[in-house]
Image: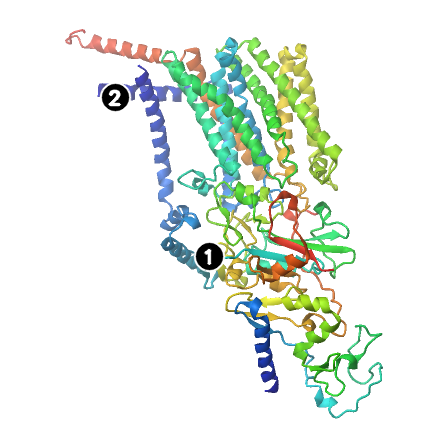
Amino acid sequence: MKDRNWTRREFLRKASLAALAGSSLPLLSSCTKEEVEDFLQKRFVEMTPEEKTRVIAKLEKRYEQRYGKKFQISTQEAPPDTVWGYGLELSRCIGCRRCVYACVKENNNSRHDPQLQWIRVLRLKRGNLINLEDSEHFYDPDLVPEPGFLYLPVQCQQCENPPCVKVCPVHATWKEPDGIVVVDYNWCIGCRYCIAACPYKGRVFNWADPNIPKEEVNPAVHYLGNRPRMKCAVDKCTFCIQRVRQGRYPACVEACPTGTRKFGNLLDPNSEIRYIIDRKRVFRLKEDLNTESKFYYFFES
Amino acid sequence: MEALGGILKETWHFYRRTLLLVLKGNRAYYAWCLSLLAITIIGFLFYLKQHDQGLIATKMTDQVSWGLYIANFTYLVGMAAAAVLLVIPSYIYQFKPIKEIVVLGELFAASSIVMAILFVMVDLGRLDRFWHMIPFIGSMNFPQSLLAWDVVVLNGYLFLNLLIPFYLLVKFYYRQEPNWRFILPFILLSVPWAVAIHTVTAFLYNGLAARPFWNSSILAPRFLASAFCSGPAIILIIFQIIRRVSLIKIEDHALFKIAELMAYAMFVILYLLTAEIYKEYYSDTVHLAPFRYLFEGLHGHHYLVAWIWSAMAMNVVAFFIFLVPKTRRRLSTLNLGCVLIIIGVWIEKGPGFVIPGFIPDPLGEIYEYVPNLVELMVSFGIWAAGFLMFTLLLKVAIPIETGAFSHVTYMEGVFRREEEDQAWRIDRPIK
Amino acid sequence: MERRVCGLTFVLLLVGFFASAAHGVVEEVAPPPMTEGLFPCSNCHASMETNRTKRELKEEHTDIKLHHAETMRWCLDCHDAKNRDKLRLYNNELIDFKESYRLCGECHGNLYKSWRVGIHGKRTGSFAGAGKRTYYLCASCHDPHAPKFKSLKPEPPPDRPRGKPL
């Protein structure tokens, strides 16, 4: 008697599932082959080299159709014995925001609806550096620097102990061997848990399809970096992964008119950043949270 | 072969009867179901708009990246956990008056979980990538990510709260004694599992060092206590409706027992809230800012102040209603207390919890989040869908429980038809 | 031609100087920011008389307002009196404009030390690999006659979230 009841219930359950599956068939069949491929795409780190080549080719074609430029998507890996570090001299930042817009251009960020800026420059009153609640984000004077204030640019700190990596439910974000925390934009499900977890507001969300003016698109991209994203994926500063892995300075370092920003390999004893850490008074934001950020602020004067 | 044919016939009859049960009712039933269906469809249409545009159709931003959807999710997980409060006295303490109605409470928990899961689904930016969260097929970040834990425990709880009532109802349908050695372990498991779902939900907020408003140790106890206030409150109201519209007998004694347990839980929420407020206001560090935003307003922003103070007032009044035996044992004041605590806890645990966590954001910026029409309509749609599902489940479960819908009537019908068949075949020998 | 040979030798010298830090990166100097049409200075000054009196210039170079320790020094303390195409160090050594940092470093020693390893001032291009790195002279960012950094107009602030004013 018990077995008969089991079979009946099992049957009920199986029948319902079959009905559900059957009703979803017409939905699936209306998708194109490419949409199915997109849907089933694996995580970047789990792809074989052939799959990677295929995905890159598909994306390059898609970007060319959309933006009219020939894209070159690099998948260059981290160089050996490298951990990138960043230095920022607070005594020299004048708050001009040239870094913000150079980054936006280099990294194909959405310009409006939503406006995504990976760098945020805060203006603080002199005498206070830690209580960021008193910061001003929207200062717009005629000339900077304004007397009595200092400027603190903040971006993703590429933590060694990143809280965002810890909380991502699908392993869409991870720390590369050279220390850069990257996002696989095609794997991210858009739950925004990482944005809640980041103590520096380093991560932003593509609330809609990005709006990038076609003529300003930068076609030299990296799969994990500045390739044009899609709606509802998280992105963040990647230390210009497309540049630094080829040995070039990040865009913000080159754009700064006062030479505030310094970049280098923390494992190279002759690099600029090591010189700074060894000789200057460096500190990192919110060090008590133990994130081991790689973004060292310092003062010369 | 004949046995299979028999099984198919019975199953088909079962489906047909459930469909008839669900589609037939009095006017009030039709009005209720059709309006819920209408709200659900409207919500779905708004969701399609959000799906098309992207989440920019909501009012969430990089500063406040979780809004009404996650607020409702948090509240509903609490509601689902509350079914356990019925299970414990009935099965563990063998408190007879509650035993018959546990199944209905568990169906309510299942509907709550479905609503909670729906809220997460509409909040996800890329729902088409949900399969990334399935372990072994996708890549679930278990055990590091608390959201992965949440997916596991919520689905497990849904499974438990569908298995147990369905098993018991099917057994009752066949007029058989349930095999307690099979089902009792599941029932007992649902108790720690209910605690687990809400603890995991609390932990996913609790573990974020970046959000000092959430990063407090008593978050999990607060969540559980508030769940044990609001969930049983709505169950009390639902049971009173059930005993009015059906033949199920629910004694007042059972309701008052539940209310008594709720009184303890209400004391706990008020006590823990006091502890939290004392610690923040007395220490007076920078981490006081979200609390000041919530209770006083910060730098001229004060949207939530009126809401939270009304919630405080509602919770305190409800506590006293439930504390004093006279008001607790009178149905009119009891119902008032239930409504107050439901709304009060929703405000305190939903928007009054999720939104101040983001204000001010880690860089000190303040964005006052107010949900827009899309979010409101989708939220109403999901609540309506959950209640509709619960109504339809009850429409089948209650006749099974009262015995009006059972295998016995089916067998009687079969036996009668066989007799009629025999009566027409005079040439066939009667067996 | 002369300048090009000078520049090439100079670059080679710098390559040797920075070799340990560069890992094969070719160092390149940004050109000194000369005013249009004035260099080489000897075009005019070779035929002129040298007047060593400290005074305010009234006939030429009136656009240059010296605001750099002007109570203690004037033009001919840095520019060589006899050869205006060169700058003069304390030990009377004459240096090219491309090496003007040596002159700045005589007074601003700490900053010069920092600049030499690249932590003061600006470098663009490649810091590793087989690329080219451009370093900027002091004079590229600081006008030697009025070195204090000029204020800039900042780029626009970020949009308010959802257009809500603070």
Q: Quadrant of residue A248?
A: bottom right
Q: CA distance from mark 1 to mark 2?
A: 60 Å
What residue is rendered at 61% in x and 59% in y?
Answer: A274
Q: Locate residue C156, reporting x and y percent.
A: 67, 58
What residue is rendered at 61% in x and 62% in y?
Answer: A272
Residue tagged 1:
A77
Say left or right for C67 vs A275.
Answer: right
| Same-chain check, marks 1 and 2 | no
Residue B302 in view, yes or no: no
Q: Locate residue B288, reporting x and y percent.
A: 71, 37
| Marked residue chain, label 1 | A
Residue tagged 2:
B4
Q: Locate residue B95, reporting x and y percent.
A: 52, 10
Q: Are marks 1 and 2 in contact (CB under 8 Å)?
A: no
Query: Which class describes the residues within 10 Å of circle 2: few (<14), some (14-19), or many (20+)?
Result: few
Residue A116 is marked as none
| Marked residue chain, label 2 | B
Could you tell me which secondary element the residue under label 2 belongs to? Answer: helix
| The N terminus of chain B - image quarter | top left
Type of amino acid under label 2: Leu
Say if B4 sits above or below A279 in the image: above
What residue is rendered at 72% in x and 73% in y?
Answer: C104
Say if B73 sits above or below A40 in the image: above
Pick whichever, B258 or B338, lies toward us.
B258
Type of amino acid under label 1: Glu
